[in-house]
Each structure stands twice: as C-alpha cells, then as structure tokens.
Image (cartoon, grey):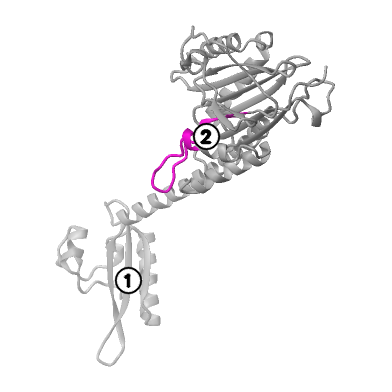
Amino acid sequence: QGRFTFANQQYCDHYKCTLADILGKTDFDFFPAELAEKYRRDDWRVMETGQTYEIVEEHQPLGQEKRIIRVVKTPLYNSDGKIIGLQGIFWDITQQQLAEERVRRATAQLAQSRKELRAKNLQMEDDLKMAREIQLAMLPLQYPPFPRSADPADSAFQFIHRYLPTGTVGGDFFTVSALSEDEASVFICDVAGHGVRSALVTAMIRALLEELKSLAGEPGQFLTKLNSDLHAILRHAGTPLLTTAFYLVADCRTGVMRYTNAGHPKPLHLRRRIGQVEPLANVGGKSQPALGLFENAAYATSEIKLAPSDLVMLFTDGLYEVAGADYEIYSQTMLIGDVRQRLQLPASELFDSILEQIRRFSADGQFADDVCLVGMEFAGCPPA
C-alpha cells in the first residue's frame, strides 16, 4: 500500500523525526505531491516487475533544500516467493555531482582553450613561416661580379655562403654589396638568441645599412654610425641585445682589404699559396665592443693585402660553440686546425666538409645556435 514499515536511524535523522513519526506514513507525507507521485510509480514498477530499480535524481523533503541522491529499490519476498513490498536505500551524492559538474565544465573549458590555442599556434606558425621567407629573401640571392662588366665566373671576387638557422627564424644576417666598379663589401652580424626577437633586430640592422650607404666605403666610420643608431633604438628596450658584427671592404684592383670588427668572432684569412690560416686581428690587437652597448663607441679600421687564391672566411659563433660527447666544446683553435687540413679545397667543398666535421663532433649531431658562414675568394686583379 506504499506505507513505511521500517526505517533505520540514518533515515530518521535525515528527515529529523523518529521511527514512530514515519511508520504507516506514505511519500505524500514527506514530499511535494509531484515528487511523491513519481516515487509511488517507481515503487509499483519494482513490485510489479520484480526488477531492481536504480536512479540518480533530485530529492527535496518538505522544508529542506533540494539534494541529489542515488536510489536503489529492490523487491521484498515472503517465504512463498511472493512480492510483499520493497526496500529502498539512498545516499546523498550532491557534493560528488557538483564536483563532477565542475570537472565537466573545466574539461569543456580546457577543450575550448586547447582549440583556441591550436588555432593561435597555427596562426603563429603561418606568421613565422612568412617571417622566415622574408628573412631568407633579405639574404643575397646572387652576388655582384667585379669588375661589374665581368662574367660572374670570371669575377675577381667569388662569394659563397651557408646559412643554417636553428629555428624558423634566426638572429644571423649577412649581405654582399658592390660599392663601386672595383670595391666589394661584406657585412655579417649575429644578434644574441635565435628567435623572433633576434630576427626583428636583424631586420632593423638591414634597414640601417641602407641608410648608411654614404659611409659604406669606410669600415670604421660605418660601424661607428651603425652602433650609434642601433643604440638609440635599443636603449628603450630594457634589456640590451648583444649584437656582434664584422664589416669589410675589398678592392679587386689593388687587393687591399680594409675591415673592422665589433666583438665578432675573428674571420679566418686562408693564404693558400703559402699554406697559412690566420685569424684577422684588429689594428693594435685590441678587441672592440659589440654593437648597441655603448653610445659613443668608435671603431678603428684595419687593413691587409690579399694575394690571388686567398679566401676570407667569415662566420658566426654558432659554428664552433658546439658541445661534444664528453662536454668538450669545439673551439676556434680546433676550427683553425680543421680548416688548415682542408686549405686547398674549393670554397664550397671546404665549407660543406667543415660543417659535416662539426656535426660529427656534436653530441647530438646538431648545431645549438644559428650558423652563418660566408666566404670571399680573391681570384686576382683583373686585367686593366
């Protein structure tokens, strides 16, 4: 008949009453009519079918807050196997449900965040790919001949380069220009790091080079003005970016090469005819500061005479700052030794062989930093 015949103490405590208050009562005495009617239908289903009924549902006794409970109702049998009623058990899972709902919401938010992050990452990858294409387009696609009327194969200066950024964009940059019919210039720089920030600084430097063409024939003055302009731009950035650079101007008629160095690794002068490899030192033997650090830094010009078949090899520090298997660092001394062993190779073969040698030395077969390698070979003075 849907009347209570027993209730345990937990049940009585839940409804804030005694067992005597419960016995003989129905669901309509404890719940709103709509809920009581539902509970009555569920009870009859169990007693008519003999099947256990389990459900998670809302539960709100009269005068109490709404809760979420898990309910299990099972039929009761007499000794003849006849269903004479049912037993109901329930327990409060409100906090569990609320916690699960919070987890579901957090999961949904995380999934949405991941979706948005993937979209942003794809956009960033597209932007970086475009930046890489622009950066590569900034590098020389072909080299000018010297003198200008000469066939490229007969040029007094032959150029070669290898550019290996470790990321999508890099902090190394170089350019080769014709200052006149007979004068060539080569500029190489290395901005600390190898990400977007470094790439932006290289783009600024390239723009500044265009504005300094009037000083391009004087290496010392050229880097002095470049340093001043770069310092004016970067001093508001908070953290200075270490930028090293080397600039040279060579005359194919005289073989004279003038250069200046702003904290950059010393290029190598390969004197093939006499079998020597020498680092290009500054005049006076003193180092000069990197660009952008000191507003009034002045850079001196050094000078050497090139002989036919000489090769000037410029590079960034990513070429030799490589860790080997036993944490040994590939040094500039090791680089000079390996270049000396390959002194008579054509420039392209020499560069590729050196790069492969250093990869074999590296513990992981890779370069840890951007690598830029530029060569200028002097074929000899052209006919008058």
- Give the Cα distance between marks 1 and 2: 84 Å
The answer to whether residue 17 is left or right of residue 264 is left
Rendered image: mark on residue 72: 1
Q: Is residue 117 shown above or below 378?
A: below
The image quadrant that residue 18 belongs to is bottom left
Q: Residue at x 63, y 42 (%)?
A: 352
Residue that protrudes farthest toward the bottom in the picture = 80
Q: Is residue 115 visible?
A: no
Q: Residues within 10 Å of mark 2 (few under 14, many from 20)?
A: some
Q: Quadrant of the N terminus?
A: bottom left
Q: Indicate left or right for 143 with 71 as reference.
A: right
Q: Please, is residue 363 above or below residue 383 in the view?
A: below
Three-letter residue code for mark 2: Ile
Disc number for residue 63 = none
Between 48 and 167, the one lying in front of the other is 167
In the image, is residue 16 above or below residue 192? below
Of the residues under marks 1 and 2, which one precedes in the sequence?
Answer: 1
Q: Farthest front residue? A: 274
The amino acid marked with disc number 1 is: Val
Q: Are marks 1 and 2 in contact (CB under 8 Å)?
A: no
Relative to 151, residue 15 above or below: below
Any part of residue 316 in sight: yes
Q: For residue 12, which quarter of the picture?
A: bottom left
Residue 319 magenta-highlighted: yes
Residue at x-position 67% and y-position 30%: 134
Q: Tell me the residue that label 2 is attached to.
A: 336
Secondary structure under the numbered disc 2 in the rendered image: helix
Residue extent of the magenta highlight:
312-334
